[in-house]
Amino acid sequence: MDMNAYLSMFIDESNDHLQSLNENLLRLESEPEELSIVQNIFRSAHTLKGMSATMGFEDLAALTHEMENVLDLVRNSKLKMDSFIFDTLFKGLDALEAMVQDIVGGGTGKADVTSIVASLQIILKSDYSASSASAAPVVAANASISSASGAMLLDEFQSSILLQSIETGHNVYHIQIAIRDNCMLKAVRAYMVFDLLERNGEVIKSDPSVQDIEQEKFDFTFSVFTISNLKQEDLQSQLLNISEIETAEVTLLDAESLAVLGQSTAAAAVETVEAAQIEAPVVAKAKEDAAPSSQAAKGQAPAAANTPANVSRTIRVDIERLDALMNLFSELLIDRVRLEQLSSEIKRNDLTETVEHMTRVSSDLQSIVLKLRMVPVDSVFNRFPRMIRDLAKSLDKKIDLVITGADTELDRTVIDEIGDPLVHLLRNSVDHGIETVEERIAAGKPETGTIYLRAYHSGNHVFIEVEEDGRGIHHERVLKTAVKNGVVTEEQAKLLSADEINMLIFAAGFSTADKISDISGRGVGLDVVRSKITSLGGNVTIDSAFGRGTKFSVQLPLTLSIISAMLIKLGSEKYAIPLSSIVETGIIRKEQILHVHGNKMIEFRNVIIPLVSLSKVLDSPDFNENEETETEIVVVRKGEKWAAVMVDEFIGQSEIVLKTLGKYLTNVEAISGATILGDGYVALIIDPNALIK
Amino acid sequence: MGEELKVIVFALGNEEYGIEVDKVRTIERLSPITRVPKTAAFIKGVINLRGIVVPVIDLRGRFNLTETTPTENSRIIVVAVADIEVGFIVDSANDVIDIDTDAIDLPPEIVGGIKAKYLRGIAKLGEGRLLIMLNLSEVLNKNEIIQIEQLEV
C-alpha cells in the first residue's frame, strides 16, 4: 500500500496532536489535580502512537508508547505528577516534534531517544516500587494480558472493577467486533472503536491486548470488556457507524454472568460469556439504515463525554491556490471595469442591469477572497506558552502568560513574518522585564509575574501588545548605556523626552543587560524587531512606568496584498503613492518655493521642508512642473522627516492590489512595486522612503 | 539522429531566431507598456499579462541593433527561465518547427552583430535558411545589465 498518499495527512495531524499535547501539558502543570486534562493528553498521545505505528515510524511510536505508559499511571491516579515528570514529558515532546520535522523534511523520522526513554522508564519503575498496594494488581493484570492466549480471562482485579461498576449502576458490556476482511488499515479501525469506547466510558480488558491490536497483530476480530454510559442499542449503532466494521456484538453483563466468568477457565471463557448472558445479543449487520439512528444517538450522547462540542468544519488549502485565486480575481476585476465602460457607452437597459448585478456579486466575492487569506494569529501565539514556561524555568522566575484575542485574523503573509519579532519581544520581557522572585517580593509585588499578550483589530490595523508587570525601563540607565555605546551624544541625551528615551532601546547595538545571557541581551534583538516590523508596514511603540512594567505595542497592516493608495498623474503616466505615508495634499504657487543652498524648500505648517520633483526622480518624458504656476503637492513622511512631492494631478484614492515587478527587475530606484488599474494598465507604486534623504 | 526539438521561430530584421517551445509561456500582441524609470534603455517597461506584471525588453535593443517602431506584426514573446519571467518584443513570430539537435552547429564569432555568447548555435533548415538559437540564460543575465547601466552613467 502506498503510504505517501497519507503522509501529508499524517504530518498535519501529528502537528495538531503535538500542539494539543503541548497545550494540555501546560494546563496540567498549572492544575495538576485535573485528571480530565490527563485524559485529553492520553488520547492525543494514543492517537499519535497509532498513526505513527501505522505509517511505519517506529521510533516515533516507541517514544510515544513510553510517554503513554507514564500518562496511563497518572490517569489511573497511580502516579503523581511532579516537575521531573513534566520536564521529561516536555523533553519527549520536543523529541517527537523534531522527529515529525524530520519526516516533513523527507527524512525517516529516526532519532536516538534512548536517554528520554530511559528516564521515562525510571519514572515507571520508581512508581511500582513506591506504591506497592495499588500497583500490584496492575502488574498482575499486565502479566495476564501478555500471557492470555486468545481467551478472555478476567483476573481478580478486573472482575472486581466490573462488579463494582455493575453495583453502582453502570453498564458493563462484552463486545465482539469483526472488521471487514478487505480493510487496509485494521489497526486504525480498531483504534476508532477504542476511541469511541473510551469517550463514552472505559475499556477494562481487550483480547488481543491493546498493544497487539495497535501493531495489527490480530485477525479481523477482537473482543473487549468495557464500562460505558451508553445504552446497548446506542453503543451498537455507534460502533457499526465506524466504517469497515462488519459486525459488532454487544452483550450486557450483570453480576451473575460476571461471577460465572470469574470462575471459568481460560479455554471456556468466551463461550461462557455468550451462554451466561441474560439478554439476547443484538447482532446487526452494518446496514445503510443504521446511519440515521446512530446520528440520533450521537445527538443524545451525554454531555459528560469529553468530546469538544464545536468541531469546526475546515479543509486545508495550498497557499499557492489561494494566490492563484487572488490573481484570477484581479483579472476579473479588470474585465468588470471594462464591461462597465462598455455598457455605459452602449446604453442598453438589460445590459446595464446585468453588469450592475455582476459588480455587486464580484465585490462580495472580493471580500471573501481577501478573507480566505486571513489566518487567526493563534497559529503564531500557540507556541508561546511553552516557550515562556521553559524560559521562566531556566531563569528561575515565576511567570504567567495571559493571551487574549488569539482569534484575531491577519493576512497569511504577515503571520509568516511576525513570529520572530514577537519571540524577541517576549524573550526580552522574560529576561529584562520580569524580576526574579526575590526582587518581586522585595518590591511588594506578587511573586509570579504576568505577561499579557493581546491582539485586537482597530480600523485597518491589527495591534499586538506585549505587556508585563516587571521592573519597567530605567531611564537613567538607558541614557548612560546609550551614551556609552555611542547611540546618542551627551548633549542630545539631555534634550530627549521620556518616549524618545524609551525608543532608544530599539537602537542598533544597544543592550542594558549587565551580563549577556543566551536568552536576550546581545543587543541585536530589539533592533531587528523594529526593522522587521517596519518592513511589514507596521510600527512599534513603548509605554513604560519604572517599577511597574512595560508595554510594547506593535501596529500591523491587516494585509500586505492590498493597500490604500493615492493615484496621481505625471503627464501621461499614472503612479500610486501608499496612503500610509501621506501626511497631506495641497497646492503651492511658484512664488512660495524657497531656495536654500540651491535646494528647493517650502514652508509647510511652520516648518521648512524639502520640495522633491517627482518628474526629475522618475525622468518623466512629458511633464515638467517648472512650466506651471501652481503645483499640486503630496506631503509624505518617513519617520519624523517630511518632504513635499510635486505631482501633475491627483486622480483619487483607491484600494490597490500589490504586485511585484518580477525577478528580472529588482531594486528599481524609488519604485516599490506595481499594481493593475481598473483599465488594465500597470501603474507603478512609488516608494516614499526613497524620496526622503 | 539527435533529439527532436520544438522551437518557436521569430524574426528580428531579416534574421530568424529560435527559442525552445518549453521555455515560452505565451505569445502576445503588443499591449500598452508602462515605462519603468531608471532602468536600462532596452527595458521598455512592464505589461499586465492576465493579472501578472511582467517586464518587457526590446530584443533589438538588447542586441544593440537599431530599434524600430512596432508594427502590426510585432509580438511579445513571454519566456520563463529559472523563475524569471520576461517578455521579448520581436518583429514577428509566426512559426513552430521541429529541428534535429544534430543540425545545430556552434555559432561563429559574430552573427548579425550579436555577441556569440548569447547564442546557443545555428540550425540549418535547408534552402539556405538559417535559424539562430538563443541562449536565454545569457540573454537574461542580470550582471551584464548592471554593467551596461554603469557604462551609461
Image: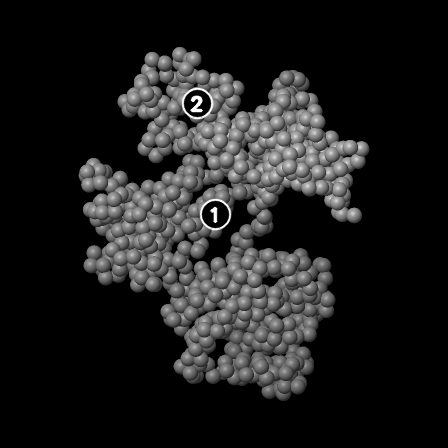
Q: Specify whether residue B19 is in view.
A: no
Of all residues, the one furthest to the right in this rendering is: B127
Q: Residue at x 63, y 63 (%)?
A: A238
Q: Position of residue A7 (x, y in %)?
A: 61, 59
Vertical order, A185 against A155 (above or below):
above
The one nearer the camera, A181 or A688, is A688
Mark 2 residue element = helix
Question: Sequence-wise, which precedes: disc 1 or disc 2?
Answer: 1
The one nearer the camera, A303 or A322, is A322
Q: Residue at x 69, y 34 (%)?
A: B17
Amino acid type, callout 2: Lys
Q: Is residue A33 left or right of residue A333?
A: left
Q: Quadrant of residue A640?
A: top left
Amino acid type, callout 1: Asp
Q: Position of residue A520 (x, y in %)?
A: 33, 54
What residue is shown with label 2?
Answer: A616
**What number is the disc on residue A416?**
1
Q: Considering the image in quadrants, where does the N terminus of chain A appear?
A: bottom right
Q: Nearer the viewer's eye, disc 1 or disc 2?
A: 2
The one nearer the camera, A129 or A295, is A129
Q: Position of residue B51 (x, y in %)?
A: 59, 33
Mark pair 1, 2: CA separation: 38 Å
Q: Residue at x 43, y 47 (%)?
A: A418
The one nearer the camera, A249 or A408, is A408
Q: Is residue B41 left or right of residue B79?
A: left
Q: Considering the image in quadrants, where does the C terminus of chain A appear?
A: top left
Q: Chain of mark 2?
A: A
